[in-house]
Image (cartoon, helix red, strand yellow):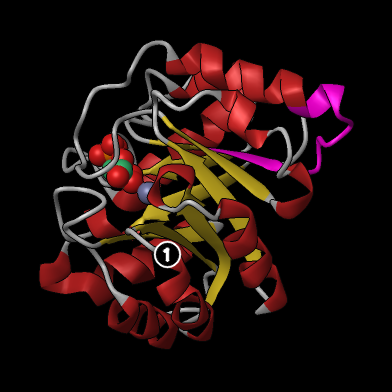
Amino acid sequence: MGRVNIEASLACADFRNLSADISQLVEAGIDYLHIDIMDGNFVPNFALNFDIMLLARALCAIPMDCHLMVADPERYVERAISSGAEFVSIHFEATHHAQRILQLIRDAGGRPGIALNPSTPLTVLEYILDDVDLITVMTVNPGFAGQKLVPAMLRKIANVRDLLRSKGRTDIEIQVDGNVSFQHIPAMLSAGATMLVCGTSSIFDKRYDIRRATEAVRELVQGKESRI
Ligand code: DX5
Ligand code: ZN
């Protein structure tokens, strides 16, 4: 298995003391900050915005991955990148023109990602593999933290891995987003996940300290039994 990135879903941080949480994420060696942007339209909720990305960038140098859960995402590509995003992911379901927007992200200097809701089949990936650096398997329906894994998604992760292997594109990252818990991480990794979006199910589980919880995720990535 190649390198697995551990991401912290910033929307799950404690905003009463964001800078303290970010310091802990830096100390924990988090690979990416995952920035959920929700528009109250594509998903029935609101979440982070570009000002928060700029704030996070002012507080730390952790690379950022911007997950646009918005309708007509082309409107926000430039701002996501100018606000510090390395990866910018759009939802296949949020536009009629996914390929064009993925190209727009690439042309603007970002790394394009395509996110698929649980019910979206993998056939939609067939002609856009050259346009993406990242595929996000939504393991819950997007919009809310704290949901339960949709069980069929473990099979979907493995199907993405098999598709990428069959096309010789194992360089494309497979991100999992939603209920990435200590319980589910081993099966997600076995199925081929390479980027773990860790939210309230692990790194931001209030029962644990961020650094200790991140260490426990890392132990699972390294194939060890977690001691959390
Ligand atoms: C989906 C979000 C959440 C987030 C929270 O829209 O991106 O899944 O990561 O993580 P959990 O599911 O662990 O609360
Ligand atoms: Zn997300």
Left/right placement of residue 3 relative to residue 190 reads right
Please, what secondary structure does the residue beneath circle 1 have? helix
Number of other residues with Cα within 10 Å of mark 1, as a class: few under 14, some 14 to 19, many 20 or more: some
Residue 220: image x %, image y %?
53, 27
Residue 164: image x %, image y %?
77, 29
Residue 59: quadrant of the picture? bottom left
Residue 125 visible (yes or no): yes
The amino acid pointed to by label 1 is Pro
Left/right placement of residue 160 relative to residue 139 reads right
Residue 224 visible (yes or no): no
The residue that label 1 is drawn on is: 73
**Residue 207 or 102: which is nearer the viewer?**
102
Which residue is pictured at 33% across the width and 58% down the height? 71
**Residue 171 or 92: which is nearer the viewer?**
92
Residue 127: image x %, image y %?
73, 39
Which residue is pictured at 74% across the width and 42% down the height? 129
Residue 144: image x %, image y %?
19, 42
**Residue 55 or 76: which is nearer the viewer?**
76
Left/right placement of residue 150 relative to residue 154 reads left
Q: What is the span of residues highlighted in magenta in the rendered image?
A: 164-175
